[in-house]
Amino acid sequence: MEDIITAREITFGYPKENNQIQLVLRGVSLTIQEGEFVAILGHNGSGKSTIAKHMNAILVPNEGTMTVCGIDTKDEEKLYDIRRQVGMVFQNPDNQIVATIVEEDVAFGPENMGVEPSRIRELVDQSLEDVGMSEYKHHAPHQLSGGQKQRVAIAGIIAMRPRCIVLDEPTAMLDPKGRREVMRTIQRLNRENSITIVLITHYMEEAAKAGRVVVMDDGQILYDDTPKHVFSHVRELKEVGLDVPQATELCYELRQAGYDLPEDILTEEECAQALCHLLERGKAV
């Protein structure tokens, strides 16, 4: 697979008073291949949102290099090309919705790219279908639920046909139903459309659905591996202020109490199956 995002020894800081710099990223190196679904975790201030903004050239490194689809993000003449390749979805969908009708909002990006009207119609219809919002195309966005608004925001991005979508805590402001809607949409886009997904989240169950999890702490990468391997480090994750999926937590506590359970449990189904096997072996009391 082709590398779509490559960070090499990125250091970045925000300016403070007295010409000081508050370092947020400290020599971060990361490669994301086309078609991957990568979740990035970290407590507040760990640098996860800052690295996400580097992937879309909203921010550029103080030191090191960020390359997107072979383009150095410091090349200001190529910003348009970068942002056509990597779309960005933020926490609050209201900040990304610009029109009063759903289909007009989804058409906004392609129109600004100079796409032919007939092609825009195709892109809008296909994008709304991809996120399961076709029946709402004539609705006003303010009449939609939070999850529906976020799916419209995602449709607006995929109408520009990016190779990668970076989502910065897209479910943070949603209720559980809205979070499920958005996660199903993200997974389907990755699975069926082969769109590369980078998901910044603080929900462990969401991260567990990714193919790869990157954990950041104090501006550096602590872990970069499969969800099963990353979440097996329960104690270490807790030490840096992170949780693990509930099923993983339960099995961890039971292991601490002396029960023989696997260390790589992620889902409720896996947890239930492991507990059934434990009971069948007569190890439970």
Image (cartoon, grey):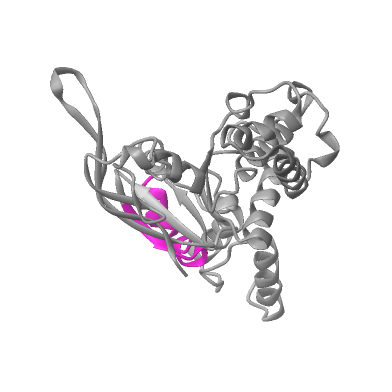
Q: How many marks?
A: 0
The answer to which image quadrant residue 224 occupies is bottom left
Where is residue 228 drawn, in percent x and y? 51, 66
Instruction: Look at the picture and state if 118 lies above or below 250.
Output: above
Instruction: Look at the picture and state if 77 lies above or below 196.
Output: above
What residue appears at the point 25 percent right and 34 percent down from the top-left corner? 13
242 left or right, relative to 104: left
What residue appears at the point 64 percent right and 50 percent down from the top-left corner? 186
Q: Residue furthest right?
A: 135
Where is residue 64 drawn, in percent x and y? 22, 49
Where is residue 266 drawn, in percent x and y? 59, 62
Where is residue 138 drawn, in percent x and y? 83, 29
203 left or right, relative to 218: right
**Is residue 238 located in the magenta-colored stretch of the structure?**
yes
The C terminus lies in quadrant = bottom right
Residue 16 can be seen in this image: yes
**Is residue 84 located in the magenta-colored stretch of the structure?**
no
Q: Residue furthest top?
A: 17
What residue appears at the point 15 percent right and 25 percent down from the top-left corner? 20
The answer to which image quadrant residue 222 occupies is bottom left
The answer to which image quadrant residue 5 occupies is bottom left
Q: Nearer the viewer, residue 129 or 275?
A: 129
What residue appears at the point 48 percent right and 63 percent down from the top-left corner? 256
Q: Which residues are magenta?
A: 221-241
Residue 200 can be seen in this image: no
